[in-house]
Amino acid sequence: MKTSIAVVGVIGAGAMGRGIAQIAAQAGFSVLLFDVQADAASKASQLIAEQWQKMLSKAKLSAEQYQRALESLQVVNGMQDLAQCDLVVEAIVEKLDVKRGLFQQLDDIVSDACILVTNTSSLSVTAIAAGTKIPERVAGLHFFNPVPLMKVVEVIDGLLTDAAVAEQLMAFSTQTGHLPVRAKDTPGFIVNHAGRGYGTEALRILQENVASFRQIDQIMREAAGFKLGPFELLDLTGLDVSHPVMEAIYHQYYEEPRYRPSVITAQRVHAGVLGRKTGRGFYSYN
Ligand code: NAD
């Protein structure tokens, strides 16, 4: 397996991929960003450059660090351009078959020494790895949104992950200024498993008309000390991401009733009322 990571590929230039590319380039890794959607990666790269510009103006980056970060980030137009990567981070749609397909494609592009990681929130790392020719080099690297601000990251060992790979990922995460926490591959890992209590129960309270979503958010912030209420968090994450996460954890635990997803979020997904990204979620953002 790899002894050092220099070139990092990031696949998917949405909220997560953009953040991962930013922190990796800022830390001095050479980053290649790819998205299947035309222009998504170049738009993400512009947004990242704007973040760096802001950091420069607030003296959070020196002129030299700013210049180096800009030079470290490159948009690529095809998966083939990731051939030279030492590490590839996948942050695409939360669908097992799509992720498995992507990892199988990567198998034929990168060298056998390249580490492949998924940023999945809830899918089985072991199942994603099982479709590849070297499951030992596949792991989970689960960042949180927004990546530059949320310093914790889960490093997830699939059933067959080589311990040396997980250790490399712990070191990589630390190099990006993040705080890695190692977890076994289980549905939802640590945060999204514990978070079921927060999100799913809040939705039940709403469904039972005990309180409004605003009241629930307010009390969880002010009395329970959370930074964001459960509905503010759902709006930030986006229901297109968090509802499938709820479904995935529920199904992986063999329909355990306490993990049952909510009809409230299902309906909102159908309506395209997804949260901040659509300008409307539980709250309005226009
Ligand atoms: P997003 O919708 O913002 O971005 C996904 C991007 O992936 C899009 O730009 C899309 O065009 C691209 N994409 C889809 N299929 C692709 C493919 N085959 N090849 C290349 N690009 C492809 O999603 P996101 O919120 O960034 O989430 C991405 C992943 O990170 C998901 O697995 C999600 O569960 C996980 N995650 C999300 C959060 C969160 O709070 N949003 C937190 C932790 C983990």
Image (tube, rainbow, N blue to C red):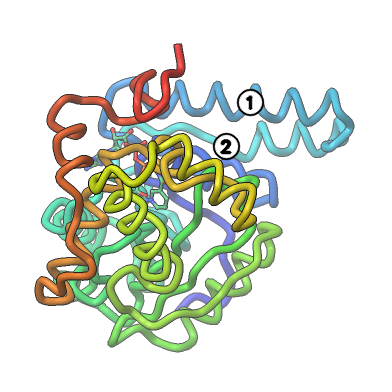
Q: Residue furthest top?
A: 286
Q: Residues within 10 Å of mark 2 (few under 14, many from 20)?
A: many
Residue 97 at x, y percent in the picture = 11, 56
Q: Which residue is disc 1 drawn over?
A: 49
Residue 73 tag number: 2
Q: Secondary structure beneath disc 1?
A: helix
Q: Does any portion of residue 104 appear in the rendered image?
A: no
Q: How many marks?
A: 2
Vertical arrangement, residue 163 with respect to residue 54, above or below: below
Q: Secondary structure beneath disc 2?
A: strand
Q: Whereabouts is ligand 1, in terms of quadrant?
A: top left
Residue 177 at x, y percent in the picture = 71, 59
Q: Please, what is the three-letter code of the amino acid marked with disc 1? A: Ala
Counting residues from the N terminus, which is met first, the one under dot 1 or under dot 2? 1
Q: Nearer the viewer, residue 284 or 27?
A: 284
Label 1–label 2 contact, CB within 8 A: yes
Q: Residues within 10 Å of mark 1 (few under 14, many from 20)?
A: some
Residue 113 at x, y percent in the picture = 40, 73
Q: Which corner quadrant holds the N terminus?
A: bottom left
Is residue 155 found left or right of 199 in the rendered image?
right
> Does label 1 point to a residue whose CB lies under 8 Å from ligand 1?
no
Is residue 2 found left or right of 272 in the rendered image?
right
Image point (27%, 53%), residue name: 204
